[in-house]
Amino acid sequence: MNPLAHVQHFNRRHFLGRSGVGLGAMAFGSLGGFAPTVQGSSVPAYVPSVAPKAKRVIYLFQSGAPAQHELLDHKPLLGKMAGVDLPDSIRMGQRLTGMTSGQASFPLVPSKFSFARHGQCGAEMSELLSHTAEVADDLCIIRSMHTEAINHDPAITFCQTGSQVAGRPSMGAWLAYGLGSESRDLPAYVVMVSRGTGRLGDQPLYDRLWGTGFLPSSYQGVKLRGGGDPVLYLANPAGCSTGFRREMLDDLAELNRQSYQQHQDPEALSRIEQYELAFRMQASVPDLTDISNESQQVLDMYGPDVHKPGTYARNCLLARRLAERDVRFIQLFHMGWDQHDNLPDHLTKQCRDTDQPTAALLRDLKQRGLLDDTLVVWGGEFGRTAYCQGEMKNGNYGRDHHPKCFSVWLAGAGTKAGLSYGSTDEYGYNIVENPVEVHDLNATILHLLGVDHLKLTYRFQGRDFRLTDVHGKVVGDILA
């Protein structure tokens, strides 16, 4: 080709594509700096600065905000003051949601459920948690959690990403990026979602809750579905053999490598790894989800719902199977805890969904020696009010959102078993001892994994980001 023809061959689009930054990359670059990092979830970007107690996390997130007064934070005073308005000296002008801010009164309402002390530790727990109460000596209960957010979506987003504003990496993505994966054939981060019977039309959950934000997409949480194919688009289409799929992936990998050499876009390398992991998952996922080799004793321990794919009980069993396969971060979301009305009926159903499988998971992990290096976390996004939302009729009532105090628990992997930490006032409205903020909880989870939350950072748009932002301290009192 003569020189003139050679020049004419390239138009403006060719120039931009060959110059190392395509049109999309140029637009993205105008938003700020992007720091390519170590690629591949199997390659850690962070070296633990303290000896880890936990190798993995199972986070049992109870979406909708469980009512602490009915479950873990007994307040006998509410029984003596039923129907009496919450004193102004206790409320102290605190923010209310739009659902109760217009109420003429805020009548205190006691729990309909009885409490008793359990285990050698004497932890006080509700009759609704009769199975969990049997493993009370394995739990570290925190009754003094508090958060910034007062509505569901920003509160759940805050718990998962450290920010109320969507777009930040989730905790599982941070850990996949920082610590890599110990499993070759499964993702470092797996998510399962179940819908409770307590409130069928509960708050929605969005896939961005297990997203990567500005981290490379290879650290994305992979959702295991309860029906049909556990992972979408994993199976080969009709007429496509395993050998043909292997050849196609090899060709795709070569194209992505060439794309990376030209454009230096780290997502090209992420695509290679994701395709390769998906290829390996074609064998590992069916083996994971096939529970036919589980003993009848184990299945009975999780309860009758374990036989129904997509239920919380089945997901708890799969969480144990994922832990055995060294998945780094396993997250269960269970919907249905938003009891603004009909709380006694709805909460009873919700606990029927979750109480037995949760206790079974802890027992199962402990029997197999996995609880020693598996951190289990149970909790929701905020608490609920001591007063009744709306009018209390015939012992029926509901509770509104309350971010100023709520309860969670942790178990295993370096936590103090049998400990009840922090306390609220007699009304269960304000914290009076050892407050623990969401950033503190997240910092503590990272610490148990050997990660200093101040050092696990990622530079994006000219700023260093981290899961705990500019907040958070490790709660040393709950560590063994």
Image: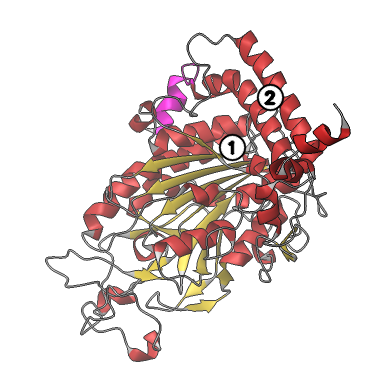
Q: Is residue 182 above or below residue 229?
A: below
Residue lying at 20% horizontally and 79% vertically, measured from the top left: 83
On the image, numbered disc 1 is attached to which residue? 366
Rendered location of residue 211, percent (x, y): 56, 48
Residue pictured at 39% horizontal, 45% vertical? 355
- In this rendering, the label closer to the viewer, 2 or 1: 2
Left or right placement of residue 160 versus residue 335 in this view = right
Kind of residue at disc 1:
Lys
Label for residue 252? Answer: 2
Span colored in magenta: 290-302
Does 299 appear in magenta? yes
Residue 149 drawn above or below residue 366:
below
Q: Is residue 275 left or right of residue 94?
A: right
Instruction: Return the x and y of residue 416 as percentages of the image width and height.
Output: 63, 56
Q: Is residue 477 magenta?
A: no
Residue 141 appearing in the image: no
Residue 251: name its quadrant: top right
Kindly state the secondary structure of the residue where label 2 is placed.
helix
> Residue 261: image x %, image y %?
81, 37
